[in-house]
Amino acid sequence: MEPPMQGQPLAPHRGVMILVFGILGFVVCIIFGILAWVFGNADLAEMDAGRMDPSGRGMTSAGRILGMIACILTVVVVLIWILVLVAGGLAAS
């Protein structure tokens, strides 16, 4: 007779990768910020469901927040840039 299973093994967390992606969202490219945000949301949901190792929750949360900030700042900078171009075009005409 086999002993009862203790449960499925937990998936490893990707906290380091998500944190690095969040930082790269500021430094290199906004795509990394978007990926940090999306992966962070998915991993935190997996941790909450008990399917992923929760020891990386802090790094995952930090990377997700950095990704959010990088995305929001990029949108703000692009909007300001558009406003400056429009104002410059109106002033020139």
Image (cartoon, helix red, strand yellow):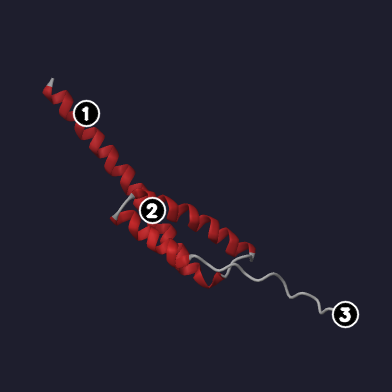
Q: Which of the two discs, 1 and 3, sits closer to the camera?
A: 3
Q: Is residue 4 left or right of residue 46?
A: right
Asked if 16 appears above or below 26 in the picture, the reply is below
Image position, residue 37 (x, y; %)? 45, 53
Q: CA distance from mark 2 to mark 3?
A: 50 Å
Kind of residue at badge 3: Met
Q: Is residue 93 left or right of residue 69?
A: left
Residue carrying label 1: 86
Residue depicted at x 34% and y 54%? 25
Residue carrying label 2: 32
Q: Which of the two discs, 2 and 1, sits closer to the camera?
A: 2
Residue carrying label 3: 1
Q: Quick one: label 2, few (<14), some, or many (20+) residues within 10 Å? A: many
Residue depicted at x 53% and y 67%? 13
**Image quadrant where one finds the N terminus:** bottom right
In the picture as drawn, the residue positioned furthest to the left comes out as 92
- Going from N to C along the chain, the mark reached first, 2 or 3, is 3
Q: CA distance from mark 2 to mark 1?
A: 29 Å
Image position, residue 12 (x, y; %)? 55, 69
Q: Is residue 59 left or right of residue 51?
A: left
Image position, residue 6 (x, y; %)? 74, 75
In the picture as drawn, the residue positioned furthest to the right comes out as 1
Frontmost residue, 71 versus 21: 21
